[in-house]
Image (cartoon, helix red, strand yellow):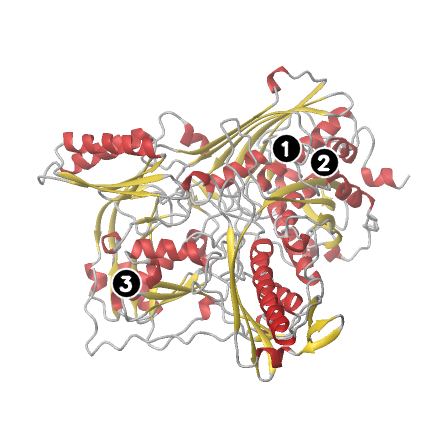
Amino acid sequence: MTAGFPTGAMPPAPTRVRPEAPVQRPGRIGEESVRIDGVPKVRGEFEYSSDLWMDGMLHGATLRSPHPHAEIRHLDTSEAEEMAGVYAVLTHEDVPGRKVYGMEIPDQPVLAWEKVRYQGEPVAVVAADHPETARRALEKIRVEYEVLEPVSSAEAAMSEDAPRLHLSGNVLRRVKILHGEPANATVDVVVTGEYEVGMQDQAFLGPESGLAVPDGQGGVELYISTQWLHIDRDQVAESLGLAPEQVHLTLSGVGGAFGGREDLSMQIHSCMLALETGRPVRIVYNREESFYGHVHRHPCKMRFEHGATREGKLVYVKAGLVFDGGAYASSSNAVCLNAATFACGPYDVPNAEIESHMLYTNNPPCGAMRGFGAVQACFAHESQMDRLAGELGMDPIELRLKNAIEPGMRFPFGQEVPHPAPVREILEKVKNMPMPEERDLEGRDLRELPGGVSNVTHGEDVKRGVGYAVGFKNIGFSAGFDDYSTARVTLSVDDGEPLVRVHTAAAEVGQGLVTLQAQIARTELGVERVAVEPADTRVGSAGSTSASRQSYVTGAAVKGACGQIRERIFERVREEFGEEGSLALDEDGVLSDGRVIVSLVDLVGDDEIEETLEYHHKETHPLDEKGQGDAHLQFAFAAHRAVVEVDTELGLVRVVEIATAQDVGKIMNPQALEGQIEGGIAQGLGLALLEEIQVKDGKVLNASFTDYLLPTILDMPSVKMEILELSDPEAPYGLKGVGEPPTISSTPAIVAALRDATGRSLTRIPVKPEQIAGIADRPPAEPPHPGSAGYAEIGRLDERREH
Amino acid sequence: MPGYERAELTAELKVLPSGEGGSRGQIEAAKTAAGETGLAHEAGPETMVLAGGRREVLDAATRVVEAALDAGAGGVELKIEAQGDAPRFQAQG
């Protein structure tokens, strides 16, 4: 359904000049290295994808369903098509290729036909000469819906009389792990608990946006902020009915991701509009639209039962986890698997029965978010460990130490625990870190009290609490996925100096990967000047910037390609100079026994030495029917201690300090590492206290940063960190992925501290002020008392430590 | 299929209705049969995709085609794709 073009000849398809790679002078790995994108970002000069611009470009807009569940009875675009300035109005009938997409399961319509399954589902797209014209054109599209009752929870989706949201029903995945003989286990103590995690948003600041440019030959160029260029390309090409080679993607400035950009949003729409109109088309979501435009963290309900001996040794864990996947699959399969495999925590559990379910509902689609699956499970297993400690009258840290898993043991999903697995060490570290000073409440600056200056108390009813948690997660893709990355490295002479160019498709999403690639090239080739080319699909796939995997996988690819170039240089030196001894590279050139044989400038001359390497990590395997298998590549561990002050009357919280210990294998860039740890803790704090997408009957109630509460710098506590560098013998430089573990166990540590301060059970996150203050729907059967969460018998940990 | 789809075999079936009045019923019959296989997702107003192991997808495709034809459809377009590395691909972490 295309409107007539305005009078006048169509302009020729414009092209966009490929951005140049700036030259860096990075440090070597392990050294501080200034981020090349840091200063432009701070100055506001960095070009994010929403800043993309081309003369003559059109502006795209998306018509979305206002209903979470409805049948589309009639769709009329004629009035919109006739508007001046409107170039195209497209519906599902205009999708040239496959009408559905999806990373794991292609079940999500590019544009809805017949039925919508969540509020905000795209129904039509418009291209116009001005954003406001496009918006008004959306208002002229007439859609007649027959509204249906939404399936608004995972429990409702499981009921026998629930409508089938997809052809094969509402159960998207079920993972069961059976380990040992939990049914026959004999125990002294049993604790059970039910826990719930709300729907967290990635809350990246840069909205979904991109610019599609026709290439004049039937294909399209797409400049886009994403996490995985090649999976986007493949899905876009499939829906455009084009060969992958006809679709070129270039990464543009990414304003945060955290998993929320792993799925498509406006990619196919902008390309459809560009190809239809022959003009560049930019789409930029507004903030409300962004909440509908990407997946979120899965809400989850979990029931756990732990059995242990009187001495505190775990005997079994039984758990049932039910996830709300929302309307479409996204990466829910992997989330379901992760949650099952990490449900028991980093503990030696001889018997386990875990069942994880993923359901389709009419809620917003859920998918990847930092730490997925492990975040939800960690809140439950750590809450259970505190509950068990309380039941046993045991120090919660001692209980964890007693059960800490160690290399050579087996996880409940059958995989042997690899070395290093320093659960005990990181727990000891956080236990022994100095506690923050406990200052008088009276007379304190109001900004340093719970609630800040808006607090109406001056310290009355403020209590201090301390909580601990430990967690872990897989690094890299799992369960048989052939995970790899590609790097092309070129050595040449530029302006009279050696220059290394590194080209990968790995997405820099703010974590510092561009700097890291340059550091690796600098380290491996000894060349001071490095240019990291813009990531695009002109080189092979780098996989996704997710699962904390890029430093490992793309890092290994860059290292390997540099190594091949180094060997070619050495070969040339051996041939030309007859050197027989061992050779080395540094800033001065090629050395033999510390003596410079030749400079790289002289050796390389006008040549370009180029190598491309595809790095595949070791094979992993799917779980078998009992949930057993070597499913994961690498495991990363972190522990957290939270100190909080709680206004128990008003339910306000100040997180005083987070202390953390994490094993990273190798510190590649100290500043970037600190940033990952502090950022991850901020997101963990948000999940503990603030962040939840409120959904009622399938409708989002708080799609704005006014109503979706995010921690700010005023909420962020000081962070003490101790970093362990226990080398992974199979990883490049021995490193471990670091992005996710800070998010995983910071949340339960904060909640444990809240329990310590208030004595309340607090089984749902984010914890709301009314739960902290004890304002419930009905009076509690038993009044709470401080210490009931595991500290009653032996007093608060911080008090105990002082004696 | 996108590279991330890891079923061993996928079958895309598009129902070609015959006659004006019964086309919806013909499509519905095919979709119902597809849904009963446990392997199906919708891929368009008249189209569905079956994804799974080779044998189960081929058997399921036969059942869907028969259901469509029994309901009076004029034909079914069938496109089958094998994923070379599919057996290793069960899930991502």
The C terminus of chain A lies in which quarter of the figure?
top right
Disc nearer the start of the sequence (1/3): 3
Q: Which of marks 1 and 3 is in front?
A: 1
| Kind of residue at disc 1 | Phe
Q: Residue B35 carries which label?
A: none
In the drawing, does residue B54 fall left or right of residue A2? right
Quadrant in which residue A384 is drawn: top right
Name the secondary structure under disc 3.
Answer: helix
- Note whether A471 is above or below A61 in the view shown: above
**In the image, are marks 2 and 1 on the same chain?**
yes
Q: Nearer the viewer, mark 3 or mark 2?
A: 2
Q: Residue at x 81, y 36 (%)?
A: A796
- Note whether B49 is above or below A54 in the view shown: above
Residue pointed to by mark 3: A137
Q: Give the alpha-carbon distance from disc 3 to disc 2, as whole Å.
A: 62 Å
Residue A254, image x, y percentages: 51, 63
Disc nearer the start of the sequence (3/2): 3
Residue A238, image x, y percentages: 32, 53
Residue pointed to by mark 2: A406
The 10 Å Cα crowd at callout 1, few under 14, some 14 to 19, many 20 or more, is many
In the depicted view, which residue is nearer to us: A633 or A473?
A: A633
The 10 Å Cα crowd at callout 3, few under 14, some 14 to 19, many 20 or more, is many
| Kind of residue at disc 3 | Ala
Tell which residue pokes out farthest to the left in this image: B19
* Chain under disc 2: A
